[in-house]
Amino acid sequence: MRLTTKTLAFGAMLIAISVILIWAVRFPIFPAAAFLEYDFADIPIILGTFVYGPVMGLILTVAASVIQGLTVSAKSGLYGILMHIIATGVFVIVAGSIYSAGKSKKRGVLALGCALVAEIAAMVIANLFITPLFMGVPRAAVAGMLLPVIIPFNAIKFGANSIILFFIYKPISKWVKKEVSRKKERALDN
């Protein structure tokens, strides 16, 4: 990944969209864990990962997580920032690494599927070790929430966001490539 002005501007735009999405649309899926909210904020981050690779995905994840955690999701504090970085970070590293190795529709589906499994596994581990520290609850209580709440929440959130990304990625990536080509042509003409 080459950090050009265009890449940085596109990344900043994706972070801004991510923050707006978490501000505009988020809702709990499970009443037993109302703090686990579904949102669309990871879609722009995953999009940036597919366009520019896993390193950019991780940069977008950290930046968006910190901005969201200090603004629209401030009530979750450091715990929310850390858990978001772990969940989305694992997802974009796995998805971006697989997709970057050969960009195709089939490879995209494989990347999203593998990333979903890796993210769920990472969040099981993170919840078992990090949640008791931040929430002051026994590990056994968290373990009791894994099957009925935590695993389904992560599967629904990242599964739904993956499906949405699957349908919007090609049109957006074609537009990005077209814009990059136009700018290169203009630069060569000057």
Image: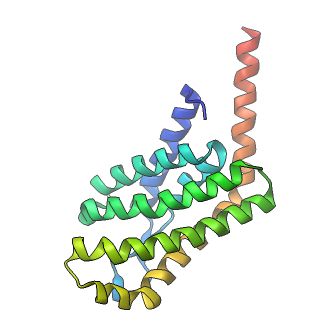
Q: Residue at x 58, y 48 (%)?
A: 54
Q: Where does the image place residue 155, in percent across and percent down from the top left? A: 55, 77
Q: Where does the image place residue 36, in percent across and percent down from the top left? A: 38, 76
Res. 34 image quadrant: bottom left
Horizontal side, residue 99 vs residue 19: left or right: right
Identify the residue at the far left of this view: 136
Q: Residue at x 36, y 91 (%)?
A: 144
| Quarter of the image that includes the C terminus | top right
Do we see residue 43 in this rendering?
no
Q: How many marks?
A: 0
| Quarter of the image that includes the N terminus | top right
Q: Where does the image place residue 75, in percent across and percent down from the top left? A: 24, 65
Q: Where does the image place residue 35, in percent across and percent down from the top left? A: 33, 76
In front here: 35 or 149?
Answer: 149
Do we see residue 63 in this rendering?
yes
Horizontal side, residue 5 vs residue 75: left or right: right
In front here: 188 or 149?
Answer: 149
- Eyeballing the image, is 183 above or below 154? above
Horizontal side, residue 169 vs residue 104: left or right: left
